[in-house]
């Protein structure tokens, strides 16, 4: 598609993007169009040069590692560590230090709770995530598999039997969240406020208070008949709501109609892995939705049967304290914006007629938009502390982090923002970053507000980096090897030692199965117990349920008792998870191949044909998994590795692709907008994209999927 440009000195800006910035973004931000483009153009030569040099260094280091791996049948960890140090891949560990980040909101610095990550180009998803700051525990439990299958709701109406199971489940959690001085919430029949304290009447008419009376912090309604009691526990809030006239309130012995949990404290509005944005039109939509979120006027119309519902951002929640003073709590999640990494270029803006790096464009425009928040131009405040929170993904080592910090410094100057108002969230998802994490944090010690592990990207980079060393273990086995636990542990230990606790988030990765909440409740408590004060969840429902874990355990208490040491973690992370002498049967090999191929096709076909960057994709067993590009990276790299080391053959992969394409088409048969790959797979651009991701996988920079996906999606859009 031919791009129309508006000339701005040495810059050319795509017409639709320039008009959006001029007409919608610039009014009210105290920056003129002339000043914006002139100052941006002045900053570009240095930034473009550094960016290009860093990418070249990635390739040079990889070439040296490839040569090293090709010359060895086995790896001596000590020798390998020396080699990585000599080539500059491993850098000297800095002396102890603590980060100095200022003006950080409490949701990030002082609180612990779930974090959502959503594609910002989907307005409905973005609004749902922003509104997931508060969630109904009753709805989350009633609509999930938390309550066993035998108590599944039947029919369309309210199932009172299942409802009672939900009430019983929630009452048990109240004993953890707000323990009574004696007895249990399971036996409560009345909640009242007496002389500024909460009094609970039990079934035997005994009146008791809270074990810690200070947990009662507010109410709605009247002192005589409150409609909501606000509890504070582990620095997060819970509402006990009452309504004797509601169906559930009538069923409950204390007329409790619901329990609302403060859930997704923070949300990452994503411009990267969960988004399919390949041109100026796509990027303009991304930026428009971010502007709508910042200014508070984003809306999405949702069809519900014959009704149309308009979804907007939630208002704040208002209360009275026990002494009658009014106060409020935010009704919305604190928003990060995730920019793209350093790799990709975009023709949405040209400098001297050449595309600029997309990450530079993201830094400029997302920060420009967020300036509205700092100037109080929106209906709501995102950051009360006056900061703009940007997650920066896929950075390789301290130099790239230092460059991101420089980029933010330059954008502050261009946009006339306060120094260090642009905060950085570091994704610890690349091998060179995790092996040099302390140095990476130090490179952004005045800006860092977040470090977070990412198993999928980290494994994809592990495979790509050591591609020539040997065949890797199956994906399930890779998860059990010592390197992964060391990586996850190192993230927390390094973060705490660098002073992040109480100043920034230390985060953990995604629960990928949105329909399986019972298993999540059994498993994801481990993230809290590891010392992480946030972890990713795939939906608002999952956020509400995962919030219970932060009541079950106090992250900051756990940290105070942790043994903070880094002994042998680096050596363990260098224990590469190869197949080694493990013998796989032909059936096991085929199953692993089919699973990888099916996952690739299932994701790619929606990305290419429908522009969907994140969705619940059924796996080979029809289990819905929340997928984005990170999943694609690990699967394509794994197949490429097995091809290189002849665990599988080209013919075997092609046959699997033909078989799995039919399965994926069948799985998506109910989607009216789905474009099938078969029977004419050879002429399906989506199928060809998947084919190239596999057979060109080892040649892709760092194993990333973006270059091929963007090219094939753009090719399809040009044909439409």
Image (cartoon, grey):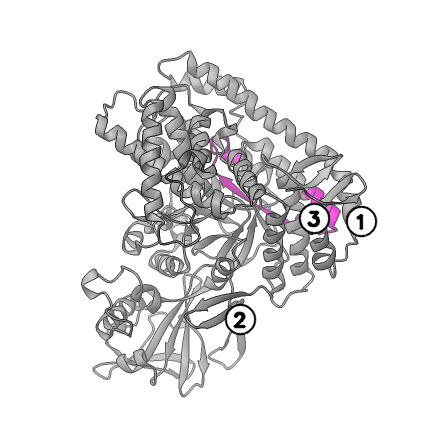
Q: Secondary structure at mark 3?
A: loop
Say whether disc 1 or disc 3 marks the residue closer to the N-terminus: 1
Residue 406: image location, x then y, percent? 67, 38
Q: In this rendered view, identify the residue nearer to me: 570 or 717.
A: 717
Which residue corresponds to the image point at 37% horizontal and 46% vertical from the top-left? 530
- Whether residue 565 appears in this view of the structure is no
Q: Of circles 3 and 2, which is in front?
A: 2
Which quadrant is home to the C terminus?
Answer: top right
The answer to the question of whether label 1 and label 3 lie on touching residues, with beta carbons closer than 8 A, is no
- Vertical placement of 274 versus 293: above or below? above
Relative to residue 651, is residue 562 depicted above or below?
A: below
Query: Residues under labels 3 and 2: Cα distance?
Result: 29 Å
Q: Position of residue 434 (x, y in %)?
A: 47, 34
Q: Quadrant of the N terminus?
A: top right
Residue 599 position, x and y percent, is: 36, 40
Q: Which residue is mark 3?
A: 419
Q: Secondary structure at mark 2?
A: loop
* Magenta residue check for 52: no
1 or 2: mark nearer the eye: 1
On residue 316, the disc is 2
Q: Residues within 10 Å of mark 1 (few under 14, many from 20)?
A: few
Magenta segment, which residues? 409-438
Residue underneath mark 1: 35
- Tell me if residue 497 comes above or below residue 93 in the rendering: below
For mark 3, does the 10 Å Cα neighbourhood hold few (<14), some (14 to 19), or many (20 or more) residues? few
Q: 10 Å neighbourhood of mark 2: few (<14), some, or many (≥20)?
A: few
Q: Is residue 638 left or right of residue 388?
A: left
Q: Is residue 419 magenta?
A: yes
Residue sticking out furthest to the bottom:
224
């Amino acid at each position: 598609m031919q791009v129309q440009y508006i000339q701005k000195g040495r810059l050319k800006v795509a017409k639709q993007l320039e008009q959006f910035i001029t007409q919608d973004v610039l009014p009210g931000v105290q920056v003129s169009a002339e000043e914006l483009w002139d100052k941006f153009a002045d900053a570009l030569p240095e930034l473009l040069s550094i960016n290009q040099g860093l990418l070249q260094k990635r390739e040079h280091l990889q070439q040296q590692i490839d040569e090293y791996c090709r010359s060895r049948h086995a790896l001596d960890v000590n020798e390998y560590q020396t080699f990585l140090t000599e080539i500059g891949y491993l850098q000297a560990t800095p002396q102890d230090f603590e980060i100095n980040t200022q003006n950080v909101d409490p949701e990030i610095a002082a609180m612990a709770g779930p974090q959502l990550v959503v594609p910002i180009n989907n307005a409905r998803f973005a609004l749902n995530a922003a509104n997931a700051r508060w969630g109904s525990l009753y709805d989350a439990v009633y609509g999930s598999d938390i309550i066993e299958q035998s108590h599944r709701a039947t029919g369309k109406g309210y199932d009172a039997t299942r409802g009672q199971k939900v009430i019983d489940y929630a009452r048990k959690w109240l004993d953890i969240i707000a323990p009574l001085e004696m007895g249990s919430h399971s036996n409560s029949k009345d909640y009242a406020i007496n002389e500024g304290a909460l009094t609970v009447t039990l079934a035997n008419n005994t009146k008791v208070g809270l074990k810690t009376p200070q947990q009662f912090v507010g109410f709605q309604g009247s002192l005589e008949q409150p409609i909501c009691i606000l509890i504070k526990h582990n620095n997060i809030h819970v509402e006990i709501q009452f309504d004797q006239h509601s169906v559930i309130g009538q069923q409950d012995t204390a007329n409790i109609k619901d329990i609302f949990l403060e859930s997704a404290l923070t949300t990452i509005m994503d411009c990267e892995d969960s988004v399919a944005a390949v041109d100026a039109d796509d990027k303009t939509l991304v930026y428009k939705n971010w502007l709508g979120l910042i200014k508070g006027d984003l809306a999405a119309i949702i069809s519900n049967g014959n009704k149309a519902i308009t979804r907007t951002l939630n208002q704040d929640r208002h209360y009275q304290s026990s002494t009658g003073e009014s106060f409020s709590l935010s009704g919305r999640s604190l928003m990060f914006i995730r920019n793209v990494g350093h790799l990709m270029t975009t023709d949405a803006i040209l400098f001297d007629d050449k595309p600029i790096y997309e990450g530079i464009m993201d830094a400029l425009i997302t920060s420009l938009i967020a300036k509205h928040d700092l100037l109080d131009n929106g209906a709501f405040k995102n950051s009360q502390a006056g900061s703009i929170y940007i997650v920066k993904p896929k950075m390789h080592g301290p130099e790239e982090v230092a460059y991101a910090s420089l980029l933010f410094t330059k954008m502050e100057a261009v946009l006339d923002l306060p120094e260090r108002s642009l905060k950085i969230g570091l994704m610890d998802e690349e091998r060179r970053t995790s092996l040099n994490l302390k140095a990476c944090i130090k490179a952004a010690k005045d800006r860092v507000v977040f470090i977070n592990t990412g198993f999928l990207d980290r494994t994809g980079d592990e495979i790509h980096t050591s591609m020539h060393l040997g065949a890797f273990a199956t994906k399930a086995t890779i998860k059990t090897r010592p390197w992964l636990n060391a990586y996850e542990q190192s993230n927390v230990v390094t973060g705490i030692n660098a002073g992040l606790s109480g100043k920034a988030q230390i985060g953990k990765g995604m629960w990928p199965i949105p329909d399986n909440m019972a298993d999540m409740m059994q498993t994801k408590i481990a993230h809290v117990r590891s010392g992480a004060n946030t972890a990713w969840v795939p939906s608002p429902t999952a956020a509400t349920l995962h919030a219970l874990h932060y009541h079950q355990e106090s992250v900051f208490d756990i940290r105070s008792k942790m043994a903070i040491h880094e002994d042998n973690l680096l050596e363990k992370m260098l224990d590469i998870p190869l197949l080694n002498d493990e013998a796989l049967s032909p059936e096991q090999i085929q199953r692993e191949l089919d699973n990888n191929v099916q996952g690739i096709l299932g994701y790619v076909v929606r990305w290419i044909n429908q522009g969907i960057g994140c969705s619940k994709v059924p796996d080979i067993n029809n289990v819905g998994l929340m997928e984005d590009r990170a999943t694609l990276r690990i699967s394509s790299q794994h197949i490429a590795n097995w091809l290189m080391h002849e665990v599988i053959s080209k013919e075997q992969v092609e046959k699997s692709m033909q078989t799995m394409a039919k399965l994926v088409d069948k799985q998506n048969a109910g989607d009216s907008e789905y474009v099938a790959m078969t029977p004419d797979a050879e002429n399906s651009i989506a199928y060809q994209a998947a084919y190239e991701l596999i057979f060109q996988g080892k040649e892709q920079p760092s194993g990333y999927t973006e270059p091929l996906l963007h090219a094939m999606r753009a090719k399809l859009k040009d044909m439409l």
